[in-house]
Image (cartoon, helix red, strand yellow):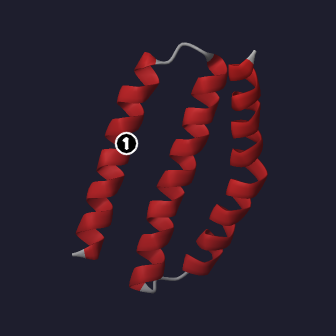
Amino acid sequence: MLTVGIALAIVFLIYWFINSYKDITNSKEKTALVTLFILLFLAAITSLFKIQHWPFGGVLLMAQVALTVLVFIPVYLIYLSSERD
C-alpha cells in the first residue's frame, strides 16, 4: 500500500509540475519550480527506497539532504530577493 501511495504521489507531482510550469513566465520562478520538483521527486523516490529497504536508500537520503542545502536554499533565496524588487 505504501508503494502504491508513493507511486500515486509521484504521478500527482508530475501532473502538478506540468500544470504549474505552463503558467510561469519569469525565468527565476521557473528555476525555483524545477529545483523544487527535482527535490520533491527525489524525496518521494528516497522514501520508497528507505521504506522498502532497497539498496542505496541511504545514499539517496544523503543526496537529497545535500541538494536541499546546497541547491534549493540558495535558489529560493535568490527567488525571494528578486520578488522584493
- Kind of residue sitting beneath label 1: Ile
Q: Residues within 10 Å of mark 1 (few under 14, many from 20)?
A: some
Q: Quadrant of the N terminus?
A: bottom left
The reply, left or right, for residue 41 in relation to residue 77 is left
Q: Quadrant of the C terminus?
A: top right
Question: Total of numbered circles in the picture?
Answer: 1
User: Taking 73 as reference, is 85 above or below it?
Assistant: above
Instruction: Kindly identify the residue that appears in the image at 61 percent across and 41 percent down.
Output: 35
Instruction: Kindly identify the residue that appears in the image at 77 percent across and 42 percent down.
Output: 74
Residue 56 in view in this figure: no
Between 30 and 60, which is closer to the camera in this rendering? 30
User: Taking 9 as reference, is 61 above or below it?
Assistant: below
The reply, left or right, for residue 23 in relation to residue 63 is left
User: Taking 8 as reference, is 76 above or below it?
Assistant: above
Instruction: Kindly identify the residue that appears in the image at 46 percent across and 71 percent down.
Output: 47
Q: Label 1: which residue?
A: 14
Mark 1 secondary-structure assignment = helix
Q: Could you tell me residue 76's position as x and y percent?
A: 69, 38
Instruction: Kindly identify the residue that appears in the image at 60 percent across and 25 percent down.
Output: 29
Q: Could you tell me residue 27's position as x and y percent?
A: 64, 19
Q: Could you tell me residue 84's position as x and y percent?
A: 72, 20
The reply, left or right, for residue 11 in relation to residue 74 is left
Residue 47 in view in this figure: yes
The reply, left or right, for residue 17 in relation to residue 65 is left
Q: Could you tell me residue 4's position as x and y percent?
A: 24, 67
